[in-house]
Amino acid sequence: MTRVVPLRRPWLWLGSALVVVLAALLALSVWRNPNIQHGVILQYQFAPAILAGLRTTVVLALLAALIGTVLGVLLAVMRLSESPVLRLASGFYTWLLRGTPLLVQILIWGNLALLFQYLGPFPTNDVLTPFVASVVALGLNEGAYMAEIVRAGIIAVDRGQNDAALALGMSYPLALRRVILPQAMRVIIPPAGNQFISLLKATSLVSVIAGGDMLTAAENISSANLHTIELMLVATFWYLVLTTIASLGQHYVERRLGKAGVGMHATS
Amino acid sequence: MLRALGVRKRYRHEEVLKGIDLEVASGEVLCLIGPSGSGKSTFLRCINHLEKVSDGRLYVDGELVGYRERGDRLYEMHPREICRQRADIGMVFQRFNLFPHQTVLQNIIEAPIRVRREAKAQATEHARALLARVGLADKADAYPSRLSGGQQQRVAIARALAMRPKLLLFDEPTSALDPELVGEVLNVMRGLTEDGMTMIVVTHEMAFARDAADTVAFMDAGVIVESGPPGEILAQPRHERTRAFLSRVIGART
């Protein structure tokens, strides 16, 4: 048996060592920093106010994702419809909501009472509480992004699938639901997962209208006790927990979809 | 069963069908032959309204396809009505177009259950009988990607038959198949002709046209150049264009 001598890579080793040392120094400088009181972090990590905020963050993200997905499918179908008006309306919506900062949209929804005092018979501020305004702003914005993701998924499905479904006497909505969308899922899920993770973090923006999310809670506490960094670290920890769970969920769903459509390409 | 009167189809710049007149009686088999781009497939897709005709009329079983006639005007049909018409017209595609996310059985029972509102047990029983008929009784639970092209096409035929169509359209059903798989599909189709199924087949399989067709129509550049019994059209074509096409096709085959 001949011995294989691996290529020596001194620079690779040196680079790796440098990264490790720098990371250790950074961790140490944060940990040993006299301006950080670790006790405060521990004190607030599971504080009821923070946990309530965490719950609101999760609910916000889930509701916005739900609204965004339904809206996204609707907008995508409109975008692909025969009617120029519907196509244009969908395109305009996406253009407007993707083209303006989410922060601005949240501020507008949060302050809508300045524009309309009443929504129908109800005072605007009774209907659009900070939480509701947050859900609406995030959901509508999410819809614009989901529209593009869903559209890409639908376009990726072979045209013959639609032909076959229609030729069997299916209506377009039925064909969409039973034939097109299930196949589009494979293309939709990975970017939709990314989109959800980015939504989880975007919920923090609603703190500007006191949306009641986790960052709002953390800011409320830190503005009282002035331990800003500590409370941001508390929030950081929970955001990482949420995004990690979401990533694992995405991974799981992708694997399951992969199995369900064993070699789906082969048919067409 | 099918009557076409002056059917035209225009796309933006070109006219693909320039007035097709045709009649297919119940139980008859029509083979449409002709060079690619001659409009055969487009005509087939007009029959079940996958393409809208630009002019002319198509009647299936005496009923105008896609429109309602009232006075001297044609009114476009409600999509629901078009679906009802399509449900009675089966179609088999060149590239099979089975639903890849469903098993063979699910592919076959999907439309009977969702469109015809058949009970699942009844639809399944019918599907299994059809699978046996196309020689694939053991593949009910397989996904399409696990099947050969010939098997997929036989499933596609079973799927079309599950709707108990009055008329079956075949759009080059064997053109995407490896040569050794063509026979099994043609055999299934021959079986259907013996059962008296009304069929319109766009094909390049001249042997099939000769044996199975009641009528062969030769299309070129958007018109039917000539049509008649296969013995006439294939053996003694009257038109130069037909002769040229046949000699090309047959020369290429042997």
Image (cartoon, coloured by chain):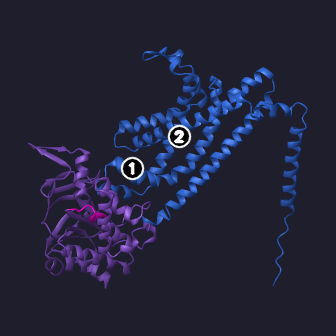
The numbered mark 1 sits on a residue in which chain? A
Residue drawn 59% across the image and 36% down it:
A61
Placement of A104 over or under B184, stated as above or below: above
The numbered mark 2 sits on a residue in which chain? A
Q: Quadrant of the N terminus of chain A?
A: bottom right
Q: Report if residue B97 is visible in the image.
A: no
Element type where label 2 sits in the image: helix
Q: Quadrant of residue B200?
A: bottom left
* Magenta-drawn segment: B159-165
> Residue B49, image x and y in percent?
25, 54
The residue where tag 1 is placed is A176
Q: Quadrant of the C terminus of chain A?
A: bottom left
The residue where tag 2 is placed is A145
Decide if residue A176 is on the left or right side of residue B8.
Answer: right
> Residue A185, image x and y in percent?
49, 52
Q: Is residue A94 magenta?
A: no
